[in-house]
Amino acid sequence: MHKDIATPLRTKEILKKYGFSFKKSLGQNFLIDTNILKNIVEHANLTEQSGAIEIGPGIGALTEQLAKSSKKVTAFEIDQRLLPILKDTLSPYNNVKVIHGDVLKADVKKVIEEEFADTPDVMVVANLPYYVTTPIILKLLTEKLPIRGIVVMLQKEVADRIAAKPGTKEYGSLSIAIQYYTEAETVMVVPKTVFMPQPNVDSAVIRLTVRERPVVEVKDEDFFFTLTRSSFAQRRKTILNNLTSQLPDGKAKKDIILAALEKSNIDPTRRGETLSIQEFGKLSDELFLDFTGNALS
């Protein structure tokens, strides 16, 4: 039996052996608590028939637990210095592949087709570097990958925003963008003490289950997201003021915006944070032709 990677002692041993120093620019914080890692993996509901994609495996602490719980793990690691370490720490597992590269630039769909051809159930499970959490999650969702869902550790504050409900101060365009594609829930809160080095903030694990179809059917997704972002540009402003100042030619089209709000049964004095995704969907469809000029094919 080899010792788990995710203990303070073993982590220090590995870092010392390779003379590894943390790079702040890469947001490296390694988990040193095996129970928490096992918990994260449990929330992904993997079986022997599942594939797991990991982003930022570090020295392999989470990778190891994924390898034990799934058929195959493919991990993206951007830091070249970690490749020899991973080769060493993950040598007991023959079902792990590490790809050296930036997941934001990778063709993830192609990787899934190549690596998981015989594993129809694929989950993304990762302890994400905080500075790129949102772009990574949005990339995975907007590319409509054949995955069941995403279980990721991220900054608690971002997790709160992702899972937020209308009418709360955390609710915003990020909540809508992610809940449009998935059902989002925070499954655990993680103290900063279980990381090396310790980050300045608490973390949380969020589970995103991909919906079979988006939560609302809209005529144009790009315009829908433009509209939601515009609605939260200045949180204290009303929906009417935000859209007038943010949408292209909004000032000239104020009457059109007002009419669309009325048609959608949305009081123009409401703030963006009080609108449900369904209300945004309705409004988006009302305004779409006036702001994109595309006749519906």
Image (cartoon, rainbow, N blue to C red):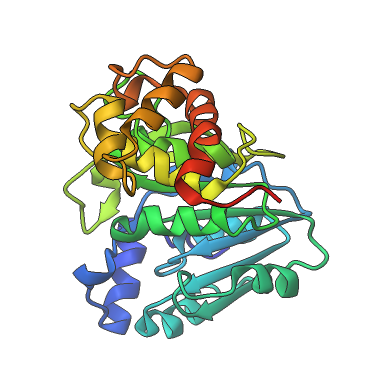
89 relative to 247 in the view: left or right: right
Can the viewer see residue 222? yes
Residue at the image position 25 percent from the left and 24 percent from the top: 238
Residue sitting nearer the eye, 189 or 165: 165
296 relative to 234 in the view: left or right: right
Q: Quadrant of residue 113?
A: bottom right
Residue sitting nearer the eye, 125 or 102: 102
Q: Position of residue 105 (x, y in %)?
A: 47, 75
Q: Quadrant of residue 173?
A: top left
Labels in figure, total? 0
Residue at the image position 83 percent from the left and 65 percent from the top: 118
Residue sitting nearer the eye, 2 or 284: 284
Q: Position of residue 40 (x, y in %)?
A: 50, 44
Q: Residue furthest right?
A: 118
Residue sitting nearer the eye, 157 or 247: 247
Is residue 278 positioned above or below 155 on the image?
above
Say which quadrant the N terminus sits in: bottom right
Can the viewer see residue 232? no
Residue at the image position 31 percent from the left and 83 percent from the top: 18
Q: Position of residue 220 (x, y in %)?
A: 58, 46
Q: Position of residue 268 (x, y in %)?
A: 33, 19
Is residue 109 positioned above or below 81 on the image?
above
Residue at the image position 63 percent from the left and 55 percent from the top: 144
Is residue 144 positioned above or below 239 on the image?
below
Is residue 126 positioned above or below 253 on the image?
below
